[in-house]
Amino acid sequence: MRAVVDTNILVSGLLGMYTSSARLIDMIYIGRIQCVYDDRILSEYKEVLAREKFKPVISEKERKDLLHYLSLSGIPVFCSPLEGYSNKAPDPFDLPFVEAAVAGHAACIITGNARHFSFFRNNPWQIGILSPRQCYTLICDG
């Protein structure tokens, strides 16, 4: 399944071993989820995962291994601004995730903050906004 993975999923997955987000990282590593990203998203992943507050709980090896794997196995895309959406997003930092989802023909955006993407619900591309649990259930039961 092609998906855009919000940064909070990677953080949560690396912080909590027995969470739905951690299971999604497992799904990425075994190829059940192909991450769609652009350079802005990859830069955000790198910046957030390297924050000082995460250094005691996310090892440098874990962080680098995941970022390396995502950049090799994921689907890089070049994005164009989406007409009619740039002024609807409450947080402009969420726009790259929406633009990458459209450019990469993703099935969904996986996020722990679905309300941040409420402006993109019922989009014409039928890209879903899923919580980690919803996505995990969909993959395992679907």
Image (cartoon, rainbow, N blue to C red):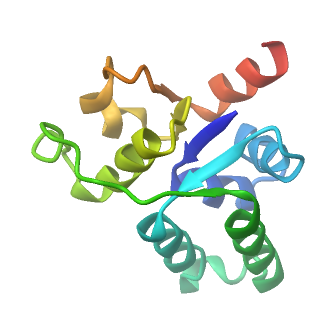
Q: Is residue 121 above or below residue 115?
A: above
Asked whether 60 or 97 is in front, the reply is: 97
Q: In the rendered image, which quarter is residue 131 located in? A: top right
The residue under the point 72% across, 82% down is 56
Measuring from the top left, give residue 33's x and y in whole percent: 74, 41
User: In the current view of this chain or complex, which residue is farthest to the right?
Assistant: 30
Q: In the rendered image, which quarter is residue 93 located in? A: bottom left
Measuring from the top left, give residue 7's x and y in whole percent: 53, 57
User: In the current view of this chain or complex, which residue is farthest to the top?
Assistant: 142
User: The N terminus appears in which quarter of the rendering?
Assistant: top right
The residue under the point 74% across, 61% down is 14
Measuring from the top left, give residue 114's x and y in whole percent: 42, 33
Measuring from the top left, give residue 57's x and y in whole percent: 74, 74
Asked whether 31 or 139 is in front, the reply is: 31
Q: Is residue 51 above or below residue 111?
A: below
The residue under the point 68% across, 69% down is 71
Q: Is residue 20 above or below residue 6?
A: above
On screen, residue 87 versus residue 45, left or right, reads: left
Figure label count:
0
User: The C terminus appears in which quarter of the rendering?
Assistant: top right
On screen, residue 88 versus residue 111, left or right, reads: left
The residue under the point 51% across, 44% down is 104
